[in-house]
Structures are given as structure tokens and as C-alpha cells.
Amino acid sequence: MSRYRELAAHTEKLIADGLLRPGERLPSVRSACRSHGVSPITVTQAYYLLESRGLIEARPKSGYFVRARLGQRLAEPAMSHPVGGSTQLQVSDFIFQILDSVRDPAVVPLGSSFPDPRLFPLDKLGRHLANAARRFDPLASLSDLPPGNEELRRQLALRYLALGADVSPQEIVITSGAMEGLNLCLQAVTRPGDLIAVESPTFYAGLQASERLGLKVIEIPSHPRAGVSLPALAEALRRHPVKACLFMLNFANPTGSRVADEHKLELLELLGCHEVPLIEDDVYGELHFGPQAPLCSKAADRRGLVMHVCSFAKSLAPGYRIGWVAAGRHARSIQRQKLSLSLATTVPVQIAIADYLRQGGYENHLRRLRNTLAAREAALVEAIEQHFPSATRLARPQGGYFLWLELPPQVDTLRLHQQALAQGISIAPGPIFSAKREFGHYLRLNFGHPDTAAMTAATAVLGQLIEQQL
């Protein structure tokens, strides 16, 4: 870690621990230089980083001060309590009806599942793609069939290694995005009529994939900050013939929750005892706000039960549709499923991504992206505190780009969704994240779009529409 990031992390911890309180002045640049033995530019960069995350603020001719802790005025939602046991899914038509209504580019995309594509180095990626197309070897059409381009899989294996996970390139299968990866994993370990465990609430695309494959789901309670409940999961595994668990452990969609590292180890131990595979959708794991990446589940996978699904869509290349599965003991099955389902992922795009990773720059891009998302999260929370009812509940995420809000019980977010669209604003209403259409007074908001003024104005309009329902 660079020196200025170490200083920023140290200061952030002092703020989190309450040693530096809201409104207190930080040491001057000169004083911090003497205390930490660093240069003025190091201190300045650290303070700029903390300012971008909404933790401190500069006051003209006065220095830097700790900002009021945004989000502290609003309580966080409690653990979810899904109703009943297993569910035969009938959700796709309902979900498509909601999603089809928010594709208008003129709409403020608070309900979108994607960050703003302008946050990504698309020009640089385009040059790599053009170069890959010019020097494309026709034989690669055969050599880069599943499991995929060798250099791309090697680069991914190196990234796993940096996270403490020894993942062989032969275990990695390149897919056309994470959604294909999830479908391949589900097909590899389930049959129609089987039961899988999902979080409550959960990402609607997982529900749609499960419905298409004829699966039933059992919803496991989860906390919007801490993630899936391990005691509830243990009870479900004891009582039901669960064939697989489909979870997001890092900055889940829609809640933004993160399962703590020690609880991940407990989760893997629990699933190992029951020989139940974990299909982990980890597309947001790179988007952590703090200096330390979450524990990679593959680093603690001793039985080959973790099927780690990821993609570059949220962190680097939206629209390129490059994902992968580090499939453990199921790698061979996933490879065969991929061949029979779609034959191959576009080869020049694989080559372009591999070249970009090999030449470096990805980590610098990720640092900028994380800082931008952290600043946007602080801005949206500030707007919510200003414009939403005081009974609103939210949990502050440690990464990703989603906020999960609980509104007063009398608010109907499906109705709010329609009212907001009429005002040119999209939201993601809570019922689309539940197999039984629960969470009727919850909603998910996306802070991954950098137009802060439009986001703040839209939040004010949403606050007015919510008040009209009270």
C-alpha cells in the first residue's frame, strides 16, 4: 500500500473509533508531516482521499475537519424474516415488467443495476480490442474454446494469487458474463425440482435463473450490513435437502451487505460438513471502499466446493460480457456445459482484456473507481438524510454501489416506482428481490452515477412522493 493510503487508512480508523470526532480539526499538513515522517504531498493526498470519501471536509483558511457521520441519524434495517419454507418460483414476468420500464436514458437511473459506463477506461480498452482484432490468429477460434483464452486465465489466476488463493488456470472457465456463469453452475449441481438456498432479499437475476431451470428456493434471513444468517442456514441445511447455496458475500445486491471474513470461514466449514456447494456471485468484490480487500472465499476452499463467479462488467468493462467461474471440483462439468450452451465466449474480447491486465493499470483504475463510488455513496446518504422521512432506515455499505432502504410501513414502493417514473426517476422496488414478493416498503438505490446534482434533485423528488403516501 502506498504511504498516503496508509495514512488515510490510519486517520479513517481514528474517526471510526471515535478518537477524532465530528467537527474536530485534523492536524495541519505541516504537523502531520512531523508526526508521521512523511512529505507534505503525502499528507495532502491522504486528506484528499478522505475528503473524496466524505469523511472530512476542507474549510477555507481553517484546515480540514471531521465531517458529521453521515447515516448515523438513520437507524439500519433489522434482519429479514422471509415467510414460509421452499417456494416454486413464478417471478420472471413480474420482474421483466418492472425492468422494461426503466431503460429510457433520459430517466435518472437510481433504479439501475449498472454503474455509469463513463467511470471505466473504455477508450483504452477499445484500443486493446482493435489491436486484438488486427492480429487475431484464426486458429484461436479453436485454441480459445472453453475453458477460454490461456493468457486471460493466467492473468486471473495471478489476481487470485494476490488475494491468497491458489487457483489453477485449468480451474477457470471463461463465460459470457457472470449471469452465464451462474446458470452454468446451477446446471452443474442441480436438476429440475431441486432446492437451493438464497439470501432474503436476493438479486432478482438469480431468482429468474432458478425459475428457468425448474428449481425451488428456500430464502435464508440476512442482515443488510452483515449478510446471510449462519444459524438460519444451518437450520435449513439440517431440515431440507439443499443442493446448493447461491449467495453474494461481498457487497450484495440489493443490500450492500458484506459477510465478515471470520463468518465466511464458518460458512465454508458449515457447507463442507453437508457437502453442499457454494455458488458465490462476487461481481462487486473489487469495489471495496476500505484499503483491505475482503477475504477471497477461494483462499479458504479446501474441498473444491466453492464455485466463484465473477466478471469485469462492474469493475472494468461493462458491455464486453467477459466473466468467469473458478469452479473447483466442478470445473470439468462447467466446461462441458459451456460448450453445449454457447460454444465459446468472443475470442478477440478475451484477448483484449488479457492484454489490458498484462500491461498493468487495472489497480490504478480500481483505486479511482472505489474513491468515486465512496464519494457518491456519501453524497446520496446526505441527500436521503435531508429529504427522506426520519423513520427511514438504511445500512451503510462498505463497497459496491447500492443502498438498501426501509421506508415507513405504509409506503408501497411498487406504487412509488410508478410515481417516480412519471417524474423521470427510476428506483428498484423491494418486491423484485423476493421469491414471495416481500419487502413492499423497501427499495434499492444506485449511487454509481456521477451526476451528483441530478442524484440529489431526484432524491428530493422521491422524498416528496414518499411523504404523499404517509
Image: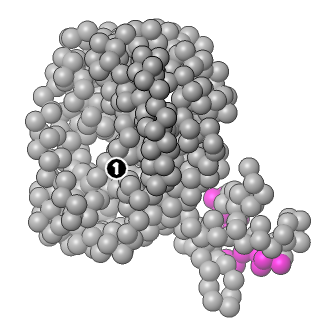
Residue at 24 percent across and 51 percent down: it is: 428
Question: What residue appears at the point 31 percent right and 36 percent down from the top-left corner?
Answer: 202
Q: Residue 343: image x %, image y %?
A: 32, 18
Q: Residue beneath label 1, please?
A: 114
Residue 360 in view (yes/no): yes
Name which quarter of the figure residue 195 lies in. top left
In percent of the image, x 34 and y 14: which residue is there?
339
On screen, residue 19 above or below 319: below
> So how many labels did they put on this image?
1
User: Residue 217 sits in which quadrant?
Assistant: top left
Could you tell me if residue 230 is visible in this image?
A: no
Q: Which residues are magenta?
A: 14-30
Query: For the C terminus, which image quadrant?
Result: bottom left
| Residue 342 drawn at (x, y percent) | 29, 20
Q: Amino acid at mark 1?
A: Phe
Query: How far across and how far down the image is residue 377, in percent?
Result: 45, 61
- Image point 84% across, 69% down: which residue? 39
Looking at the picture, does residue 260 appear above or below residue 445?
Answer: above
Identify which residue, 251 or 324, lies in the foreground: 324
| Observer-nearest of 437 and 150 | 150
- For residue 321, above or below residue 165: below
Q: Is residue 21 magenta?
A: yes
Q: Secondary structure at mark 1?
A: loop
Residue located farthest toward the bottom when viewing the structure as drawn: 61
